[in-house]
Image (spheres, rainbow, N blue to C red):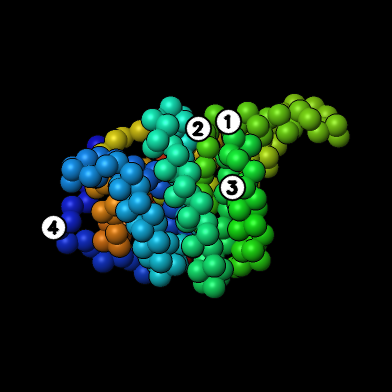
Amino acid sequence: MKDVDKNNISVPALANNGIPRHIAIIMDGNGRWATKRFLPRVAGHAKGVKTVRKVVEACIDRGVDYLTLFAFSSENWRRPADEVSVLMQLFRLALGREVKKMHSNNIRLKVIGDLSKFDAELQAMVRNSEEKTANNTGLTVTICANYGGQWDIVQACNKVLADKDHVGNVTEELIAKNLSMAYAPEPDLMVRTGGESRISNFLLWQMAYSEFYFTDTFWPDFGEKALDAAIASYQNRERRFGQTSAQVTDANCVRG
């Protein structure tokens, strides 16, 4: 069942607590947003970049610590060559234009995925952007580029196997330590825009206990109200992590 936010409905005020520490978003619907307006699909991607800026600002205002955005999956190479070319160009432009602003706002930028598939210039831009913002202590924004959850698990296992000091079995803890996002807590909330209800090979390991929120809103139209609707839905969930409701209630009473 979907939690669907509409632009014409009021969004409940957010609670003073229960803000997810880590929000992960599949930014879907750029092409369909453009097609609906009789525009080329690339116009939707360009508009989507502007939405990223708005959502980053909204997350800072709401006290979110980590925002992870699925920008380009390992499967997206199958798209038309001209569309892939535009996506790469937009990635370059975003790094060139936004990193200085992010740095001045104390934002840390991370980029994860198999970056070896990108050209040397783009790889250098990614490295420079990460180095420039590495010591910032505010919101951590992670861009997943040429990323796939299955790839992430495989590369983590290969790191463990390549460690000459490792003796014994491969454990969950070892895999988790070697994942691309070992620096971040697991996502509390995963949002997917665009009307689809699947996770599309996104953070497969990390989202074992994430709360999912699917909305029909296309990514270019996803703003503060839509984000608040997703967070409000999250706040109304009971997160049990394998426990019973009674155990969760008792634990909350003890903490209170």
- CB atoms at circles 4 and 2 under 8 Å apart? no
Q: Can residue 190 be seen at all in this image of the molecule?
A: no
Q: Which residue is mark 4?
A: 8
- The kind of secondary structure element at disc 4 is loop
Q: Which mark is residue 55?
A: none
Residue at image location 35% in from the left, 47% down from the top: 45
Q: Nearer the viewer, residue 126 or 20?
A: 126
Cα distance between the residues tagged 2 and 1: 9 Å
Q: Which mark is residue 74?
A: 2
Q: Nearer the viewer, residue 125 or 19?
A: 125
Lower sequence index among marks 4 and 2: 4
Instruction: Tell which tag, 3 or 2, sits nearer the viewer.
Output: 3
- CB atoms at circles 2 and 1 under 8 Å apart? yes
Q: Which mark is residue 151?
A: 1
Cα distance between the residues tagged 1 and 3: 21 Å
Cα distance between the residues tagged 1 and 4: 40 Å
Lower sequence index among marks 3 and 4: 4
Above or below, 90 against 35 in this view is below
Amino acid type, residue under disc 2 in the picture:
Ser
Amino acid type, residue under disc 4 in the picture:
Asn
Residue farthest to the right, as pictured = 165
Instruction: Tell which tag, 3 or 4, sits nearer the viewer.
Output: 3
Lower sequence index among marks 2 and 1: 2
Residue at image location 61% in from the left, 53% down from the top: 125
- On the image, which quarter does residue 29 sit in? top left
Q: Which residue is mark 3?
A: 122
Residue 83 percent across, percent down from the top left: 39, 37
Residue 116 percent across, percent down from the top left: 63, 37
